[in-house]
Amino acid sequence: MQKLDQDFWTNKYQNQDMGWDIGYISTPLKEYIDQLENKDLKILIPGGGNSYEAEYLYKLGFKNVFVVDISVVPFENLLQREPNFPKENLILKDFFQLQGKYDLILEQTFFCALDPSLRKKYVEKIHELLTKDGKLVGLLFDAPLNETKPPFGGNKALYQAYFKTLFSFKYFETAYNSIPPRQGKELFINFLPK
């Protein structure tokens, strides 16, 4: 398997090899964000890529939105679309080195982009980064996908095994509002740290 490092992801962006990137915020996340009322929430988008979610949140008046990514290219893309997005909220870093506490972490294709050997570590890091009343909300692929390159898939039973010791499941069901190519292949999650 290739090393999924900064060079790997930067090359993906530079070569427009981004099959996961739909070019806009996904419907399940948009509809979740639309019902959020507290604009002061401290929100993290890990492995945020082109960060359509961050752009959408910012335009709605959420100013406490942070994106962490290992490649600078998607930050440049975000700033081209939204030049006023606070540059200090764009964190060029390995997610596992991140510090701080967040009220809401949005998951959109990051979990499935990580080498599966890092999944347990991801769960532990998300738990560490959330406030005690925080939430992990987003989408996980509910499909086998690839075994040697991202995106790596999975299923509900597999994810339950990873998350159950550190999280309770407020919502964990097939997304009813996925975009057509992903219909029936995404689980919408709303997990609370124990």
Image (cartoon, rainbow, N blue to C red):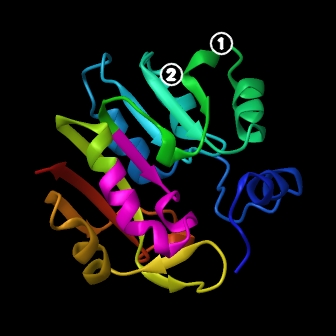
Horizontally, residue 169 falls left or right of residue 54, namely: left
Magenta-tinted stretch: 105-125
When asked about the image quadrant of residue 156, the answer is bottom left
Residue identifier under label 2: 58
Q: Do the residues labelled 1 and 2 touch (CB within 8 Å)?
A: yes
Could you say where residue 131 lies in the image, as x and y percent from the top left? 21, 33
Residue at the (73%, 51%) spot, across then down: 6
Figure check: 18 above or below 182 = above
Crowd around label 2: few <14 · some 14–19 · many ≥20 (10 Å): some
Q: Residue at x 64, y 56 (%)?
A: 22
Amino acid type, residue under disc 1 in the picture: Asn
Query: Going 66% across and 77% down the picture, which residue do you hit?
Result: 149
Image quarter where the N terminus lies is bottom right
In the rendered image, residue 146, in percent from the top left (x then y), is placed at 60, 84
Q: Which mark is residue 84?
A: 1
- Going by the numbered disc 2, the residue's amino acid type is Tyr
Mark 1 and mark 2 lie on one chain; the one further toward the N terminus is 2
Instruction: Locate residue 85, reporting x and y percent.
Output: 61, 18
